[in-house]
Image (spheres, grey):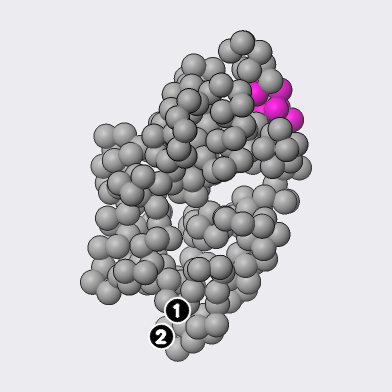
Amino acid sequence: MQEHVQALLDQKVRQYNRADFIPNDPIAIPHRFTQQADIEIAGFFAAIFAWGNRTTILNKSSELLQLMDQAPHQFITQHREKNLKKFLAFKHRTFQSTDLLYFIHFLRHHYRTHSSLESAFDLDASNMESRLIAFHDYFFSLPDAPERTRKHVASPLRGSTCKRLNMFLRWMVRRDKMGVDFGIWKTIKPSELICPVDVHVSRVARKLGLIERKQTDWGTAIELTEALRSFDRKDPVKYDFALFSLGVNEKF
């Protein structure tokens, strides 16, 4: 049974881990840029916005980048207070201007002393759970962090699958020759990544017998990733292409 499941998933990885996957996926947003910091910032926002309709995700990400004059790193690091007024009308579902202004504030704080967002995920390298908890604590460490904004940055401590952060990390860390994921971060190994899990991925994974857990939470993401490691120990999260596409594109 497991051999048949792996054969199916390997086939779907080959089918979907390719450049023509990019245009309709949120990863298209960071692919507009060539400089690492621009890729990181555009990718971070696209991942944070990635819930709901994909067309809306792409449109809202594009709207935000337009407000940043299509130069996210330059805007984040060099903007003045008066430049922030145009963000007051921005909204994506429950992500509102209060949240956006804090995100900009945090990113400016971080990039003042770091050249890459990678270091924000390297504060506790014990395992990915520790990395994500430490990132969450760091992200909300500034004195004026709004309480309402915490719901937009997931943490394993709250039981979340951390789907959007795990997806962002996949983009930044995974590296192969297919040109979809960027592979620009080096301190995290692809083998450490946790598979992004949403309702589509969990449904497909249960049908394939990869997870037994009834609820969909952080434990589910760990259970699924462990199953995928039995197929590819060094790069388990490549199967995100297969599971997500089976669920969303093929309604498996």
Height in image: 131 above or below 219? below
Q: Quadrant of the C terminus?
A: top right
Rendered location of residue 37, percent (x, y): 48, 57
Q: Amino acid at mark 2?
A: Glu
Height in image: 19 above or below 31? above
Q: What stretch of residues is rendered in magenta?
A: 9-16
Q: Is residue 191 left or right of residue 90?
A: left
User: In this figure, which residue is indicated by the disc labeled 1?
Assistant: 79
Label 2: how many residues lie within 10 Å, few (<14), some (14-19) or many (20+)? few
- Which residue of the protein is positioned furthest toward the bottom in this rendering? 82
Residue that appears at 70% across and 27% down: 12
For the residues marked 2 and 1, what is the alpha-carbon distance in whole angstroms? 7 Å
User: In this figure, which residue is indicated by the disc labeled 2?
Assistant: 81
Chief secondary structure of the magenta portion: helix
Q: Is residue 54 left or right of residue 201?
A: right
Q: Quadrant of the N terminus?
A: top right
